[in-house]
Amino acid sequence: MAQKERLDAIRDILQSSPFVSLSDLEKRFPTVTSMTLRRDIDKLEARGELIKVRGGARSMKFLTSSAEDNFGKRLYEATGEKSKIADAAAEMTAEGASIFIDSGTTALRLASAMPDIRATVTTTGPHVAIELAKKQRTIVNLVGGMINRENLSVSGMQAMKFIDGINIDTAFVVPSGFSVECGFSCGNYSECELKKYVISKARRVIMLMNSGKLGKNLPYTFCKPDEISTLITDSALPDEVEKFIKMSGAQIIYAK
């Protein structure tokens, strides 16, 4: 079967189903190798038509059907980079942990990639919570508060009070920008204050940042590299930036 026919068939499956497994595709295309099918999934992900997850792919249609326009637009940007970062981050989740997952499109990909483990996950992202709720063993807490329409995140005093009542083993945080001068930043003051508070409470902070955010300074800095444990990014950082982050004591993981 030609690749175009396979890609069309995979698209059709994901128009009616939120997930297709690699094993299902192997049964549907018995003469095609698993490696070829994985390349098909990679190709469709690069086009923004699905999200690759462990064991298969999730439908973009079901993930974005109720999203705001800006959020939905960003979901199609840097898809391969965000998926690599999410896969690397998912390996750092653990059974029995209290986990915080930020809002945003990279966080949504982490929610998809995260294994179905017995853990408690708190998030400020409604779409992240919906994706996590598909798992059977994971307890999901959605923080209450005011919705930021730009990135569909929850913040404000109600959200701060909720965070005050929980302990956090690992926090996965997503910045909107980073520079050596300003650190990790975002564009909303309430969101900035919430991120600061989460970071102050977490035993371990893992920053998820694709290379497109490097060199961007947004109005509000919520932390510096010496406040995080690990930075996961998708491509090599400039030497001076890498040196600065490592001297701050943070580990850098280049997702592959």
Image (spheres, rainbow, N blue to C red):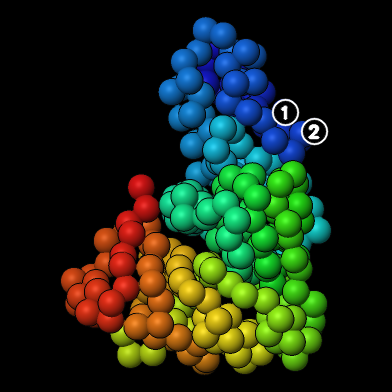
Q: Position of residue 21 (x, y in %)?
A: 63, 28
Q: Residue furthest front?
A: 96
47 to the left or right of 122 = left
From this view, report whether residue 5 is shown above or below residue 126: above
Q: Give whichever of 222, 77 is nearer the camera.
A: 222
Indicate the amino acid at tag 2: Ser
Q: Is residue 13 visible?
A: yes
Q: Residue at x 69, y 72 (%)?
A: 124
Q: Residue at x 50, y 13 (%)?
A: 32
Instruction: Judge the density around disc 1: few (<14), some (14-19), many (≥20) Cα neighbours within 10 Å.
Output: some
Q: Residue at x 52, y 92 (%)?
A: 219
Instruction: Judge the density around disc 2: few (<14), some (14-19), many (≥20) Cα neighbours within 10 Å.
Output: few
Q: Which residue is mark 2?
A: 16
Count of residue discs: 2
Rounded to the nearest angstrom, the CA distance separating label 2 from label 1 is 6 Å
Q: Position of residue 137 (x, y in %)?
A: 71, 46
Local SS, label 1: helix
120 to the left or right of 55 = right
Q: Position of residue 194 (x, y in %)?
A: 63, 85
Local SS, label 2: helix
Q: Residue at x 55, y 38 (%)?
A: 54
Q: Quadrant of the N terminus?
A: top right
Q: Quadrant of residue 139?
A: bottom right
Q: Position of residue 237 (x, y in %)?
A: 27, 67
Q: Is residue 148 visible?
A: no
From this view, report whether residue 1 is shown above or below residue 50: above
Disc 2 vs disc 1: Cβ atoms closer than 8 Å?
yes
From this view, report whether residue 133 is shown above or below residue 53: below
Indicate the amino acid at tag 1: Ile
Residue 186 is tagged as none
Q: Which residue is mark 1?
A: 13
246 to the left or right of 162 = left
